[in-house]
Image (spheres, rainbow, N blue to C red):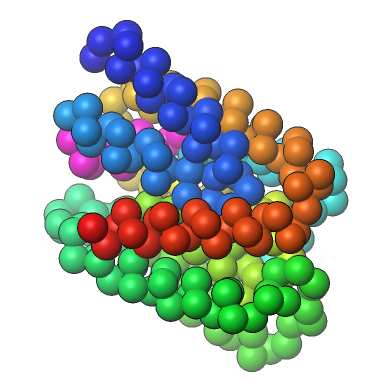
Amino acid sequence: MAFIELLLIFAAGIIGGVYGTLVGAGNVLTIPLMIFLGIPVHETIAANRFGTIGLVGTGYYKFQKKKLVNHKIGLFIAFFAAIGSYFGTKLVLSVDARILEKIISIVIIALLSLTLFNKNIGLEAKRVGKRHMLMGSFASLLLGAYIGFMGLAAGTFLIYLAVMVFGQTFLQSAGTIKIPGGIASLISAIIFWLNGKIIWSFAIVLFASYSIGSYIGAHYSDRIGNVWLRRMFIAVSAVMALTLLF
């Protein structure tokens, strides 16, 4: 791989890390770029799974300092997401993801519509009952499987889960999802590594660039606030849905 191509991936990783740590979908930029550069799909996903560990680790550190991480909710999601991630990663090694991409895009559009029509979602924290925890456990299991299977914009789905099911604000969800996101990505990366799918030059470049971008994004998160995060989230979700659909 030529130096200029690694440099392009590094730059894309920083940009993706900045907004990815806030609203998810950081790999919507890096995955298409790497595939365009001729890197096989499985190796591309594997490198991104490893790189995401840097994004969520750095983001967790910054958001935890700002007291924006709910460990109870984060660990609850992580438990079920980890189980799903294991089976999802095993599945991706033998399945074509194109049909799944179309399904995911339709789901995103539906969730985006709910966000647009309910202007208070994610702006104020809400109480969580047993019904929400039951819904959350099932959704976390499915989401974990998706993270392991493909993981494209997994952070965005985790934010949807934290906001719509667990009643968090966008700022709180950006911090809390670092726990399940990190655990699921770690499990997925280990499985890819055991199957010989990680190309370390790409993985290390993404780990470093995602970490830098995540630090920058998390550092300025409180200045951006929930209202602007909601707007960013809507914009990124729309772009992501169109990317997957077409």
Q: How many marks?
A: 0
- Residue 70 covered by magenta stretch: no
- Residue 49 covered by magenta stretch: yes
Residue 131, quarter of picture:
bottom right
Which residue is nearer to you in this view: 236 or 74?
A: 236
Side of 160 relative to 239 (left or right): right
Q: Can residue 179 be seen from the camera position used here?
A: no
Residue in the image at 32% along x and 9% along y: 3
| Residue 34 % position (x, y) | 28, 32
Residue in the image at 57% along x and 70% along y: 161
| Residue 19 % position (x, y) | 58, 43
Q: Look at the image and tell me in which quarter the C terminus lies.
A: bottom left
Magenta highlight range? 40-51
Side of 186 relative to 117 (left or right): left
Q: Look at the image and tell me in which quarter the N terminus lies.
A: top left
Q: Farthest residue in the bottom direction?
A: 131
Q: Main secondary structure of the magenta part?
A: helix
Up-down relation of residue 156 to residue 143 (above or below): above
| Residue 171 % position (x, y) | 74, 56
Side of 56 relative to 106 (left or right): right
Up-down relation of residue 158 to residue 198 (above or below): below
Q: Can residue 205 be seen from the camera position used here?
A: yes
Residue in the image at 68% along x and 76% along y: 119
Residue in the image at 65% along x and 61% along y: 230
